[in-house]
């Protein structure tokens, strides 16, 4: 293992890193101060331990004469160093410690409580980080950027206000939009329908429903003109219908015999999930939730993934809790198969329609 402490190992030119981190002296200062702005610009290794780290690693500070600098994890490993287990410098996403979690929570609270979305620079300064590093850990934790998070909150506020608002315009402006154009252009992709149709009952929209017995008890199927908006499982058909009416209190909800064909498809799908469900879905959720739900629909019947594996599949490996929350928010049982997501050790975790139903669903799928 090379031992020269004052040589910078590199396979790239200095133009690949900002000027402030091109010299060894500047890099050493960044390591000593754990400067978050240095994240992703260089890595350092300690010759006495054989380990390389991120510049912000919280491990004990090494002696200067034992430190070497690298421009990538690959060059560090090529020189014989192994990645630090604490800061995981070989991972593409930043590691997130307790203080980072607190910073993200503080930033989220600031976004929620602000009339207009704070800028990235403002958020980063509030939590004492560089904009670059703050955005990286924010996205790693939540799966979206601060701007996307703020936009999603604003859309959710508007969606929640629409059913009760005197007008669509009032709901849009109360939610924080400066004009209606942005909301109208975004709403169909975000909440699954236009603002007018989303105001359940305001435009006379009807939700058709039907209930039927199945091996899991009772299944309720509800549909808007766009497709299935709910598939619920339960022990009491009357309780299932009451829950739907409470959820869409402004809609004109009615049982409809014409929904019988869809009901039969859903019941057959419960019995034989490997056959698939070929019905349109009226999926309403945030951009992140829809990313998660799309990943769930790619899990084959009889297979499972952990929450961590789902987070990795959508490119947000640190957003495990957000993935679990998206699973819990799913209102289309089996059609969006959140029952196929389990804990890292394979054990079953919470399920909107009951753990026992989740167990029976998985057992039936594995028998096919």
Image: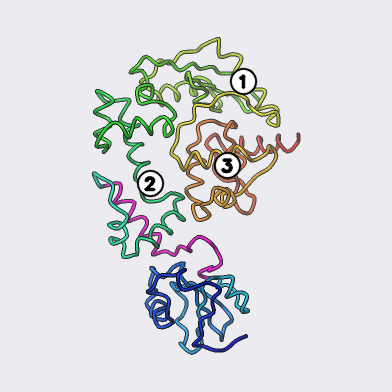
Give the quarter of the figure containing the C terminus: top right
- The Cα–Cα distance between marks 3 and 1, rounded to whole angstroms, is 29 Å
- The Cα–Cα distance between marks 2 and 1, rounded to whole angstroms, is 40 Å
x, y percent for residue 250: 35, 20
Mark closer to the chain start, 2 or 1? 2
Examine the rendered structure and indicate whether residue 245 appears above or below residue 357.
above
Q: Quadrant of residue 265?
A: top right
Give the quarter of the figure containing the N terminus: bottom right
Neighbour tally class for label 2: few under 14, some 14-19, many 20 plus, Cα within 10 Å = many
Q: Quadrant of residue 235?
A: top right
Q: Quadrant of residue 139?
A: bottom left
x, y percent for residue 328: 50, 40
Of 197 and 352, which appears nearest the observer? 197
Q: Nearer the viewer, mark 3 or mark 1?
A: 3
List the residue tagged with mark 1.
213
User: What label does residue 149 carry, if any?
Assistant: 2
User: What label does residue 295 carry, if any?
Assistant: 3
- The Cα–Cα distance between marks 3 and 2, rounded to whole angstroms, is 20 Å
Q: Which residues are magenta?
A: 86-113
Looking at this rendering, what residue extends furthest in the right direction? Answer: 368
x, y percent for residue 259: 56, 14
> What element does badge 3 sit on?
helix
């Amino acid at each position: 293992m090379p031992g020269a402490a004052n040589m910078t190992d590199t396979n790239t030119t200095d133009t690949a890193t900002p000027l402030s981190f091109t010299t060894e002296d500047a890099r050493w200062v960044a390591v000593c101060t754990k400067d978050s702005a240095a994240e992703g610009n260089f890595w350092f290794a300690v010759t006495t331990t054989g380990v390389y780290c991120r510049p912000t690693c919280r491990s004990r500070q090494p002696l200067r004469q034992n430190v070497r600098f690298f421009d990538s994890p690959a060059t560090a490993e090529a020189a014989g160093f192994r990645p630090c287990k604490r800061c995981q410098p070989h991972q593409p996403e930043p590691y997130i410690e307790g203080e980072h979690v607190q910073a993200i929570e503080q930033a989220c609270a600031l976004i929620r409580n602000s009339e207009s979305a704070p800028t990235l620079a403002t958020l980063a300064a509030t939590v004492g980080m560089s904009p670059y590093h703050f955005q990286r850990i924010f996205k790693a934790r939540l799966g979206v950027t601060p701007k996307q998070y703020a936009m999603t909150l604003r859309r959710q506020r508007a969606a929640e206000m629409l059913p009760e608002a005197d007008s669509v315009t009032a709901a849009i402006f109360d939610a924080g939009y400066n004009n209606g154009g942005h909301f109208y252009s975004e709403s169909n992709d975000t909440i699954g329908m236009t603002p007018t149709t989303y105001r359940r009952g305001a435009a006379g929209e009807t939700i058709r429903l039907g209930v039927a017995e199945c091996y899991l008890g009772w299944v309720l199927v509800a549909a808007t003109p766009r497709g299935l908006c709910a598939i619920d499982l339960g022990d009491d058909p009357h309780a299932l219908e009451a829950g739907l009416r409470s959820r869409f209190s402004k809609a004109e909800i009615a049982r409809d015999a014409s929904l019988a064909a869809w009901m039969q498809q859903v019941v057959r799908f419960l019995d034989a999930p490997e056959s698939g469900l070929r019905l349109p879905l009226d999926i309403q959720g945030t951009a992140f939730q829809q990313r998660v739900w799309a990943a769930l629909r790619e899990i084959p019947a009889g297979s499972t993934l952990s929450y961590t594996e789902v987070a990795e599949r959508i490119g947000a490996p640190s957003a495990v809790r957000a993935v679990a929350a998206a699973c819990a928010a799913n209102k289309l049982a089996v059609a969006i198969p959140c029952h196929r997501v389990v804990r890292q050790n394979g054990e079953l975790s919470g399920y909107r329609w009951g753990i026992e139903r989740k167990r029976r669903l998985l057992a039936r799928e594995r028998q096919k």
